Every structure is written in structure tokens, then in C-alpha cells.
């Protein structure tokens, strides 16, 4: 997760990218990602490191995954 955060923050259009572990639950994690626009998200999702670290990495380890797309008010 550290590598994913570091390389993602270097991408153009990534406003914020945080990773955290849920307090008291050592096997639950949260990723909070903020992108400038849809194009920035699309570029992130198409990157080499996304495929390597997320698709072939984190997702293969997850027992459950909940993803939400949020829009600021």
C-alpha cells in the first residue's frame, strides 16, 4: 500500500491518496482517493502500477471489497 500511495501521488490529477488500517482490525484497510476529474481517475486505473499493485496485488488478497464513488457537495 505504501508503494501504491507513493506512485499514485506522483500522477497528474491525483489530488490526494491516503491509505489507512482500521483501528483494532489489523486486516481491514481503507483507501481514500481524490482525483481532479474523471480523466485523472481513468489515467490512474490504466497505469502500470495500478495493474501490478491493485489488480494483480491487493484485489487478489481481499476477501471483500467495497468501493464507493463520492461527489463533493
Image (tube, grey):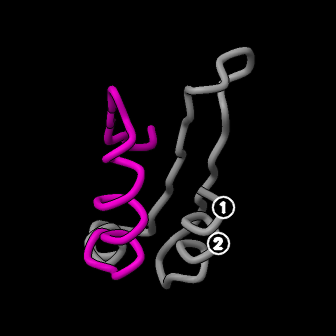
In the rendered view, would you say 43 is above or below 71?
below
The segment highlighted magenta reads: 45-73
Residue 15 point in image, percent of width and height: 57, 67
The answer to whether residue 5 is left or right of residue 69 is right
The residue carrying mark 1 is: 2
The residue carrying mark 2 is: 6
Mark 1 against mark 2, which lies toward the viewer?
Answer: 1
Looking at the rendered image, the quarter that the C terminus falls into is top left
Q: Residue at x 63, y 52 (%)?
A: 18
From the viewer's side, name the closer residue of 4 and 67: 4
Where on the picture, by quarter, is residue 46? Answer: bottom left
The outermost residue toward the top is 24
Q: Secondary structure at mark 2?
A: helix
Q: Residue at x 33, y 80 (%)?
A: 47
From the viewer's side, name the closer residue of 69 and 63: 63
Q: Secondary structure at mark 1?
A: helix
Residue 19 point in image, percent of width and height: 62, 47
Does the magenta-highlighted stretch encompass residue 57? yes
In the rendered view, would you say 69 is above or below 9?
above
Where on the picture, by quarter, is residue 68? Answer: top left
Where on the picture, by quarter, is residue 35? Answer: bottom left
Amino acid at each position: 500500500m505504501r508503494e501504491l500511495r507513493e506512485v499514485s501521488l506522483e500522477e497528474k490529477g491525483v489530488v490526494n491518496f491516503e491509505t489507512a488500517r482500521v483501528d483494532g482490525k489489523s486486516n481491514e484497510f481503507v483507501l481514500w482517493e481524490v482525483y481532479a476529474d474523471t480523466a485523472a481517475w481513468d489515467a490512474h486505473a490504466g497505469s502500470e502500477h495500478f495493474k501490478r499493485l491493485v489488480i494483480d496485488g491487493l484485489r487478489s488478497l481481499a476477501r471483500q471489497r467495497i468501493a464507493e464513488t463520492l461527489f463533493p457537495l
